[in-house]
Amino acid sequence: MGMKTFDQLDETLHYEELANGLKVYVLEKKGFNKTYATFTTHYGSVDNHFKPLGKDENVKVPDGIAHFLEHKLFEKEHGDVFQDFSKQGASANAFTTFNRTAYLFSTTGDVKKNLTTLIDFVQEPYFTEKTVEKEKGIIGQEIRMYDDNPDWRVYFGLIENMYHHHPVKIDIAGTEKSIAKITKDDLYECYETFYHPSNMILFIVGPVDAKDILNFVKDNQSQKTFKEKEPIERFFDEEPQTVAKSKKVIEMTVQTPKCYMGYKEATPNRQGKELMKHELSVNLLLEMMFGKSSPNYEILYDEGLIDQTFSFDYTEENGFGFSMLGGDTGSPDEFVERISGMVESFKQQTIDENSFDRARKKKIGAFLRSLNSPEFIANQFTRYAFNKMDLFDVIPVFESLTVRDVEHVLQNHFKKEVMTVCQVQKKKS
Amino acid sequence: MVNHKKTNLHGMTVHTIETKKYKTTSFILQVKEPINEKNVTKRALLAYVLQSGTKDFPSSKELRSALDDLYGATLNADLSKKGENQVISIRMEVANEKFLSNSEPVLDKAFHLLSQVLLAPALEGDVFKEGIVKKEKRSLKQQIESIYDDKMRYANKRLLEEMYDSEPYRLNVYGNGDEVDSITSKELFDYYQDVIKNDKIDLYVIGDISTDEMVDKVSKHFRFSKDRNEDEANAVNAADEKRISEVKEIFEEQDVQQGKLHMGYRTYTTYADDDYFALQVFNGIFGGFSHSKLFMNVREKESLAYYAASRFESHKGAVFVMSGIETANYEKAVKIIKEQHDEMKKGNITESEFEQTKAMINNQVLETIDHPIGLSEVLYHNVVAGTDRSIEEWMEGIKKVTKDDVVAVAKKVTLDTIFFLKGAGKNGNENV
């Protein structure tokens, strides 16, 4: 069993990689009632072209299959696993992102019983033609719910604009048409390939005894047999650095237009510390340029171009990366003009040490605050680990950043040529 | 379970919760008044004006910079409706200095800042700064309009308007968009003075703190005028709620992909009542969880929806059902939902539905109090309802509920209004 202490944060993380390749992490949180566990596979909506385990030929699978599989894994021959958790006083859930699928529960009761349920249900797939068909109605309604959601549409529309080929541009849930094609055999094939323990992380956070929990998990895994682990081969088409489309307008029944703009990352292939440093630098820069205490924010707010819904973020992994800024705005075109102008003029100035320090302090404070949340720790730790980063390095990496790092991303990431815009406008009747 | 102490100071109640669980200290100010047509919009605007500047930091930018300097302390004001009350919540969270590499005394500064937000706003002459009021008016209007864009929230708002057409509960907590423009800085400031003088104010401080020290700091920083009215305004009694003779059915059509079905029930039971616990269990069995009757029957058995759930409002005593369905499935979905209620009235509740629900509620409460805001919300119920229930008593109350109690509550619960936002045509035509 390994152990890592983070003195500054007063946290100790226990971990172990089991014989079958599964990585298990336990973070003890004394004084909390809740234990939260996530069982996550490094497999998401972008993994649609790959070599199935034990086969020679590559396959392309229907859009939305990772998410469909997430839904279907809950159903077993004896019924629905949700019910098992419920009976044990736990609430379960799951989510699918671009590159991971997480299954989780939280409980204030019997941790081991629920942990067994979690591990076992994810490791015992049960798909039939009948249950696969039934799910299509439910997911169809989920897709429609998102179709009516202007925030989702504008967010996804922006990503679609950026990419020519990369599957990050495909909606995570797919379309009603694409999911209609999914069969139980497709689900098994994806499952076999991506749900191998060596491609997964189990993270448990709560008032538990780490050693005891690790032994318990080890015991559970030693009773099961898995195929030999093989490296997973995923295929992605060459993605140009340019954006696929520089502007898109979606008409919907809204009263307030929405506008997002983003910059596509030219070299989204970092991992580990390099990725963390880059991500934190861009986010820090965004905070300096457009955070609530920035002169720009004040101007935009004064002019009525933004309101409380304005937000920004940078994300990068698995061959895609982008920053985005946006929210509700009365004048979407003016919004774009002003923001891009502000970015350009920021490039002309020297970065002020004081505002750099202030933004960094703010980011460190926000990170500390998020460590109050077991959900944040488990979810983010896993995301970081899949990209070979360590969540608990965030503060030291922030502290190591310099004005030069921020200047570098300012000149290299925020390029006018790779900017794109997506707007939701009021439908003309 | 929770080390909760109350101290009365100048007509403000200070609630301190000493705990080592968090890496931050949380402050939550709750300012409560019965919701009413005359002030609802002003009050919403006031919440946003207060968080936009103080005497020492007279612009949003200066205030936000001061917060950033406090290691990114957060400050936000928000509004909620708790029963017939409109509550302004001002929340602030600061890092515990012991986790910062260069220890700085952030706590004292935080107290000062929070007290300024409430008691020393940014003024121009004798009224709120015109510039701030103007900006926040625009932002508030946009916020009210944005409800229309989120169809789930919109349907919920419409349901309340129809269901409570002659009661204050129909009012939107963010006020009325048409009224925003006409509010002057003077009017708003007069209203503010009234709030500071008469509203019920509670402050929660949660973290690795000492009560004595906190009470000391509060007395130092929060100074109210001598004529502050310390008596609580009349609590509104929800028990004499309207009886229902006929279910109202309201349809509206919009160009959306999915119909939004929202149903409102009166329960004639609120937080202060003895059968409140039975209502909790009722809601859990009906639609509160993924094992509930609504989820199982509307989603799992019939594949009609992605979500079908119910929630309840503790202080108004209402249960709201919501589901997103195909427009053509309206009759079928309503029928199934009504049937689930009928089953409960008849006592058709399985042992496992009953036990699972109790276990889940227990779990939910324990999880909620793991979070500082959740904890303050749970404790604040007592202030709103005028009760004094500890969390232990609360959980004991759930434990004691019998199936007969649930059936009795199910019989009291009455469907009042159905609001259905129908879909029409194709949505979202793209063009470049």
Image (cartoon, coloured by chain):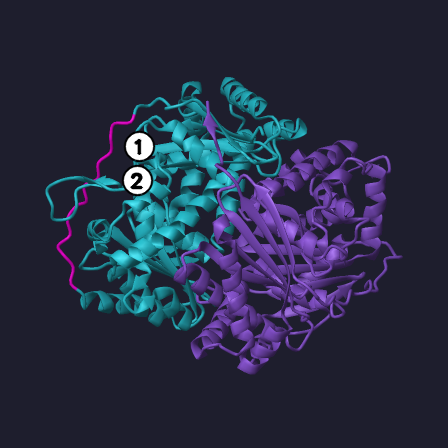
Chain colours: A cyan, B purple
Where does residue B195 sit, x and y in percent of width and height? 81, 52
Say which amino acid is labelled 1: His
Identify the subunit bearing mark 2: A
The one of A404 and A314 positioned closer to us in this rendering: A314
Identify the subunit bearing mark 1: A
Residue B175 in the figure: left or right of residue A377: right
Where does residue B201 sit, x and y in percent of width and height? 75, 58
The one of B356 and A37 positioned closer to us in this rendering: B356
Label of residue B32 in the image: none
Q: Which residue is mark 2?
A: A46
Say which amino acid is labelled 2: Val
Residue neighbourhood size for the residue with mark 2, other residues' Cα within 10 Å, grouped as few (<14), some (14–19), many (≥20): many
Residue ID at (77%, 42%)? B121
- Is A289 in the magenta? no
- Up/down of A396 relative to B209, above or below: above
- Is A234 in the magenta? yes
Instruction: Tell if the residue under mark 1 belongs to the same chain as the one under mark 2.
Output: yes
Residue segment shown in magenta: A225-239
- Up/down of A287 relative to B176, above or below: above
Where does residue A376 sit, x and y in percent of width and height? 44, 52
Which callout, 1 or 2, points at the residue further toward the start of the chain? 2
Label of residue A166 in the image: 1
Residue A359 in the figure: left or right of residue B306: right
Q: Secondary structure at mark 2?
A: loop
